[in-house]
Amino acid sequence: METFDHIIDRKHQLSAKYDELEKKFGRKDLLPMWVADMDFQVAPEIWKAVEKRGKEKIYGYTSRPDTYWDAAIRWYQRRYAVTLEQQDLIHSPGVVTSLNVIIRELTNEGDKIIIQTPVYPPFYDAVRKNQRVLVENPLLEENGQYHIHFEELEKQAEEASMLILCNPHNPVGRVWTKEELERIGDICRRHQVIILADEIHGDLVFGDRMYTPMASLSKEIQEITITCFSATKSFNLAGLQASFIHAPQAKYHQPIQEFFTIMELQRNDCFSVVAVEAAFNHGEEWLNKMLAYVEENMAYVEKYCRENIPELKANLPEGTYLQWINCKGLGLKDDALKKLMIDEAKVALNMGVDYGATGTGYVRLNLACPRSIVEKVMKNIEEAVKKRR
């Protein structure tokens, strides 16, 4: 675990997570636990591939070889026993870009689109800023565990055009079971609702939990599902701007691909091609070790809260490297909670209310970082809470 314990100074290295602290939080002296990238060095095979590409010293327009697609296809076959076809895949700079393009191309202004809240903030923007009507299907929370409100979803699907599914779910950390996904698929199939599945966290699953790609459930569900996935979240490559859209249906695939072609967004940059190939072909051992390390970080935070800050209740996520913490025991409104965490504990994190009204009283911590940083964060929060008791 030495690689993951090593602290890398990312200040003044063009890191959004560090160098945008003042812009985002109003101060620089914070421990950054917010934006979802890792403070871990990438797998050696990845940086060596990028280093080799860099030494060529010419960074012109880049051709995408079949081996790029093959790497993603083999990854899904090897890790999930799911068969993808190259002809069904589309390159996109990123999943958020994909969500917006797909909404614009496959729905109309005024269409109703369902999201399951609390959820990743760009889901709200993708619906509202494209002049669609947002429909919230709030998740049901019971003793820190979240479930889907299927009865409400059934009613909402009667008038909706699309459901944006977060699988695994950011920020609550649920890895939806096959049975849950089948029930979603059945509802959407019967009501002719397109499923837009954001599965960027699919590789980030702990213990004996299994990520199930939505489109893998059945031919019928595949026919209504478009999936967005990437190597960037799993292997810490977010700055390289590369992702995939799986759209096996011609009626969906054609307009999406045409948009990227018209916008001249069909190429990778010169480093993402080799980095993504190396990640999918050679990064599995690194990924498994990273997940084991982060799972220990999660357990540390949960135990620390339970033993030292009982006002906070940290969940143990089934997936993602993001921990969702219930701070309602502090009795603070969101503005006061934000002041406590940022100005008093000196921790830059994501406020739960930013994920929707059902996130009020919660915070999200990014725990893809060395244990020593996690320890300092929790100590800072404990001291800040003590002063308010």
Image (spheres, rainbow, N blue to C red):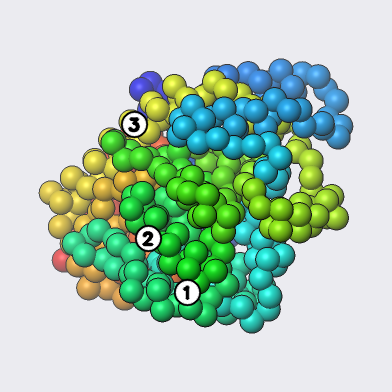
Q: Can residue 281 be seen in this view?
A: yes
Total labels drawn: 3
Q: First in sequence: mark 1 or mark 3?
A: 1
Residue occupying the point 57% across, 27% down: 74
For the N terminus, the quadrant is: top left
Residue 157's mark?
Answer: 1
Q: Nearer the viewer, mark 3 or mark 2?
A: 2
Q: How far apart are marks 1 and 3 (CA)?
A: 40 Å
Q: Which of 388 and 218 is in front in this view?
A: 218
Q: Of helix, strand and loop, which one carries label 1?
A: helix
In space, the residues marked 3 and 2 are separated at their CA atoms by 33 Å
- Residue 164: image location, x then y, percent: 52, 63
- In front: 172, or 209? 209
Residue in the picture at 33% in, 74% down: 151
Horizontally, residue 380 falls left or right of residue 117, namely left
Left or right of 340, for residue 97:
right
Identify the residue position indicated by label 2 in the image.
183
**Percent from the top left, x then y, of residue 389?**
16, 66
Name the residue that disc number 3 marks.
Answer: 293
The type of residue carrying mark 3 is: Tyr
